[in-house]
Image (spheres, rainbow, N blue to C red):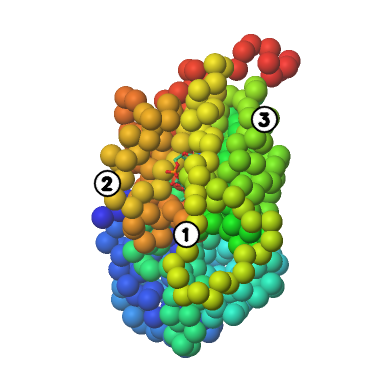
Amino acid sequence: MPELDSKHILLGITGGIAAYKTPALVRLLRQAGAEVQIVMSASARHFVTPTVLQALSGLPVRDDLWDGGAEAAMGHIELARWADLVLVAPATADVMARLAGGRADDLLTTLCLATPAPLWLAPAMNQGMWRHPAVQRNRQRLVSDGVLLLGPDEGEQACGDTGPGRMVEPEAILAAISAPSATPTETEQILLGLNVLITAGPTVEAIDPVRYISNHSSGKQGYAIAECAAAMGAEVTLVSGPTRLDTPVGVTRIDVQSARDMHDRVHENIAGQDIFIGVAAVADYRPAAAADQKIKKQGDAADHTLILTENPDIIASVAALPERPLIVGFAAETELAEEHARQKRQCKGLDAIVVNDVSKAQIGFNSDYNSATLIWEQGEVTLPFQGKEALSRQLLEQLMSVFGMRLTVPPGALGPT
Ligand code: PMT
């Protein structure tokens, strides 16, 4: 059971159908040791009653900025300071818009603006609403303001639709907010003066001008590491297969398509790098000969064979260089995850490998979350289930604590202090 050890959690509940899950969430938070103060929006009352929530949290539910009695007990600014963590679950499209706009038009949004504590949102809404450009704009604005987003999940929705917009389950919310790196601390510049090269996303291998072989990598994990490394002071170059993601602030991005492109761009940029992190899901094989023209249907009902040939192993080729950086690979495995990852680390000559067991729900490909084990020659450490941003921070901190001595920046390299 994750531990919250007397943490003060301010739980904001807004008016979405997923509010019916909040009594279970409050129970879990309390069982994990947290003190929970609930603040409801006016419309949340249509979905769950304050009586139930008060009974489970043990504290009167707050919902009114102008409630003189409640304010006399603990004023809203005091409440904002009391919180170690603010969690809004479910967070509707409306509350996301109001928070993205910096509005403070009810008790909950006022608290979210006033609190120095980290703010987590677990969005929940219809899939069409979630996909709407206005909601996506607000999501991006909130993330760049430092708000931590949990989900949403994909799947069947209360309205009958299927798609992204389901609130993350209470157990996953608890796991994410109780992870050791869940509370962002001021980012220390532990990578200042270091050059870091990262590969991310999938590669695409052409069959003909309109068809290709690829995989489900979204690039989220690699981009999160790039963003975090830049925030920690590194000069970051990101060699990326096709993704839908924006380039992280302060990162130099080089776009590629195939494994061979990625191989060439990596080798053009490898000189002077201190750390190489291969997060990309690189195709091991490509069609032996991509057709110049679109391949036509034969109409003969026979089986057809696509002949594949092996791609270069990018990370192994970097490891074989006479002057090599610290090399960290990734492995997404579906069975015997650690065993396979250890073999890969050895065969490819890597200093360390990060293994994610992608047979588990919400781990690895195209999820906003991950959990992994970092394995090196003399040890291993578990990076628990959490958002990919938080996991990236933990991974880089861990790498510096294991390999930092090898990465010392020469005196004077950072200029006069
Ligand atoms: O992009 P996301 O949706 O966020 O998903 C993240 C992820 C699941 C893709 C990522 O966490 C991950 O696990 N990436 C590695 C995927 C994988 O299974 O790699 P692999 O086992 O095929 O390769 C092992 C290592 O060798 C990797 O570092 C890979 O980049 C590298 N490799 C592989 C083949 C090749 N030809 N050249 C390589 O450099």
Give the distance between the C-alpha atoms of the residues marked 1 and 3, in whole angstroms. 37 Å
- Provide residue 404's location: percent of width, then percent of height: 49, 22
**Relative horizontal placement of residue 117, taking residue 331 as reference (left or right):** right
Looking at the image, which residue is at 41% across and 39% down?
354
12 sits to left or right of 261: left
Q: What is the quadrant of residue 187 in the picture? A: top right
Q: Which mark is residue 297?
A: none
Q: Residue at x 32, y 72 (%)?
A: 24
Within 10 Å of the Cα at label 1, are there few (<14), some (14-19), or many (20+) other Cα atoms? Answer: few
Q: Nearer the viewer, residue 128 or 281?
A: 281
Q: In the rendered structure, which amino acid carries the disc numbered 1?
A: Thr
Mark positioned earlier in the residue sequence (2 or 1):
1
Q: Is residue 403 above or below residue 187?
A: above
Q: Which residue is mark 1?
A: 305
Q: Where is residue 398 shown, x and y percent of the image?
A: 43, 33
Query: Dot 3 corresponds to which residue?
Result: 269
Above or below, 234 relative to 33:
above
Which numbered disc, 2 or 3, marks the residue that appears first in the sequence?
3
Residue with the mark numbered 2: 336
Label 3: which secondary element: helix
Question: Mark 2 falls on what kind of element?
Answer: loop
The reply to whether discs 1 and 3 touch (Cβ–Cβ < 8 Å) is no
Structural crowding at the residue carrying mark 2, measured as other residues with C-alpha within 10 Å and reported as few (<14), some (14–19) or many (≥20): few
Point out the residue furthest to the right here: 416
Image point 62% across, 53% down: which residue?
Answer: 290
C-alpha distance separating marks 2 and 1: 30 Å
Please tell me in which quadrant of the rendered image residue 198 appears. Answer: top right
